[in-house]
Structure formats: C-alpha cells, structure tokens
Image (cartoon, rainbow, N blue to C red):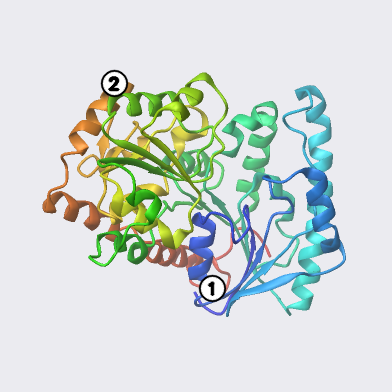
Amino acid sequence: MHGETILCIAPRTWHSLWKCVQQIMSRVAQRNRVLYFEPGRNPDRDVMGEMWRKGPNLVRIRSEAVHENLVRIESPPVLPIMRQHLPPSLLRVTTPAVVRINAAVLVRHVRRTMSAFHVERPILWLHSPYHFPLVGKFREKLACYYNYDEFPEFVQNRRIKHLLREYDDELTRRVDVVFATSRAQLERRQAVNPSAYFSPNGVDFELFNRALAPDCSLPPDIAALPSPIIGFVGWLGYQIDTELLLRVAQAFPECSLALIGPDELPECEALGQLRALPNVFFLGRKNLDQLPSYLRAFDVALIPYVLEGHVLSIYPLKLHEYLAAGRAVVTVRLPELLPYRDVVHIAESSADFISQIGHALRDRSPAAIAARVAVARENTWEQRVEAIYDVLNEHLPDGTGHARRAA
C-alpha cells in the first residue's frame, strides 16, 4: 500500500510516551500521507484548562509537519464524560449525548482539515469505541479499528462498562477491518466482524538493540546505582502490582530496584513503604531514544502487573523491547506471554515471581542473550506494518479484495 491518505484519530498526543499508534503511523508515513488528529483532551491536564487551550481549534486548524508525510493536527476540546463522578443511572443518559456532541464537533473539524489538505477518499483509522459515529462520515474508502486494549475493562470505566462494550461492538460492526493486539481481543471481535486480524505489538529493534552495543554508555542517574539492578520501564499506574514491587525490593536488599516512567501509582500503604526503602529509585520519565542506555544497566527487567481487568488480555509493548535489549525478563502470568516461555521467566505466583528473579539474575549467558534478541528480531514494527499492509490491500476497494461496507 502506498500513496494513500490515512486519517488517524489518535488516542494520544504525538509527543507523549511512544506507544503502538506512533510506532505504526511513523512507518505508514514512509509510503503514505498521515493526518494525525490528536485527542481533544490531555488526561494529564484539568478539564477547564484543556477547554481553554483547545478552544481555538473550533475555528482554526493548528498543525505541525512532524515528518515529510505526517502532519500532527490539534483537535477541538471535548466535553467530559464525568465517568468517575456521576452515578451509573445518570451516566447511562448523559454519556450518549456527550458522545454524539463530541463526534459532531470532531467530524466538522476533520472535514475542514480534509478540505485544507485536499484529501479525498482517505482511509479512516480509529482507536476508541467513542468514535463509532465517525465511520462513514468522510467518504473514506476503508475504515479500520485498531484495538490495542479492552477499554471497557479499565478501572476508571467501571461505571460505564456496559455502555462502552456496546460502543465497542458497534464500532467493530461498522468498520471494514479490525486489528487486535492480543488473541483475547481478537476472539471477542471476530465474533462481531469476521474481518478481524491479530496484530500484536512489535519493537523498534534497531533502537532497543543498541543496549548491547559496546559504545552504549550508562546515564549518570542509573550509573550511580548499586548493582545488580532490577528494573521496570513504562507507565507506573494502576496496572502495576505495588505490593509485588515491595516484595521484590525487600527480597533483594542488595539490588537496586529502578523504576523508569511517569509515576502515577495510586496511593496505598504498600506504596509508602516502597518509597521509603533505600534500594528503590524512581528515575522518572525518559525519552524514547534514552531507553536503551537505561536498559543496558538492567540485570533483570520486570513486567509486574496486577492480573485483573484489561491486563488479562494485553500483549505488553515492553516485551520485545526488553528482549531486543537482551535483558532477562520476569513477568506475571499473562496469557499472551505463554508462547515465550523459552526466553521469558513466567511466574505462577508472587512467591514464584521472587524465585524467578533469582534465576534471571544468573541468566546472562551469551546463548541466552542471543535467544532473546532472535525473538525480538522476528517481531519488529516493520514486520507488523507490512502485515497490516497485506490486510489493507485485500480490503481496499481497488485492490484484490472488496470493502465490507459500502463507501
């Protein structure tokens, strides 16, 4: 696929922590034009501040040419759902109205942008169940839903879980193609739309494999930590098992526990104890290109998630990043990681998690490192995007297949 225009209604700002959407769209833009519409609200900022900051986008098109074929476009503000404040009975009434209003505002904005950038017959690329009303509004030749998480299962969505499941099913029905990043996500959506495909997370292999380069130097903050280093890279939020991290730090007092990423851990007794330990270090968020240098310092890399809700169906982005860096990985028992038992230490319980770290600290032979790197090399973002192209080529109206939905 080449020469197409993709309208990506993105779930995150371009310059935020890089996840699957930025990895995919940066590569799609090498052969196609991408208009990357950022969300109408940054969840890290207050609602009124975002309304004020993004208000001008109701009448203006503010954009940035990120790459030659990729344009970042700010979106108008969105009305909040108030999902954590209103009772479920009221949310059942107010949420559909808010979704319709936000969709109408966004449709107008995207159409104005299409006119300004001379876009006709684009490919629509969606991520959020809230955006099901957008399908069919832009004379798109193809509509895709890239499902990277079970959004209805998020803790903060518990009051509107059933409504979000309806939206997710409706979006799945309306689009031509669905991509799912885990087999559990795929199975659920294939029951609604047979044109659903498995598209797991990948890795920027060349970047993360730099951790093994002889000239890869350690940043000063992690170089100063006592070794061995047990570490985690990623968002430190409610999906993290804080009690498990506390047990790790207590079980290995001679090791440093390095936690890298935005710290948004929910306050609890275990967190207070964790912060008080002398061998625990919160190093904060790092830029993507810095991560290989930090991973180089790790003796063991962790995936310490709470096994509940949406976590049970995820395919962790960090898996192949850790492996490309040659790190020994210890993880909780995530279903998607079971096929990687040969190169990942999978714990069956909290006690086993501690035990597996002990094994991983000794798992640094050249053969083990080479095996981990070999797996990552077979799971690059370039390979993922080529597989996506194969699917899209089958479904494009002017390709070898036919769009399921009339354009």
The residue shown at (62%, 52%) is 11
* Element at label 2: helix
Question: Residue beneath label 2, please?
Answer: 351
Can residue 346 be seen in this snapshot?
yes
Tell me residue 166's x, y (percent). Answer: 67, 36
Left or right of 387, for residue 74: right
Please say whether residue 78 is visible from this viewpoint.
Answer: no
The residue shown at (78%, 76%) is: 115
* Front position in the image: 22 or 385: 22
Q: Quadrant of residue 383?
A: bottom left
Question: Toward the viewer: 343 or 173?
Answer: 343
Residue 378 at x, y percent in the picture: 28, 59
Kind of residue sitting beneath label 2: Ala
Element on which disc 1 rests: loop
Tell me the tag on residue 90. Answer: none
Q: Residues within 10 Å of mark 1 (few under 14, many from 20)?
A: many
Residue 118 vertical placement versus 204 (above, below): below
Q: CA distance from mark 1 to mark 2?
A: 46 Å
The numbered dot on residue 29 is: 1
Q: Picture coordinates of residue 183 (x, y %)?
A: 41, 42
Lateral position of residue 44 relative to residue 309, left or right: right
| Residue in the foreground of this view, choosing between 113 and 266 | 266
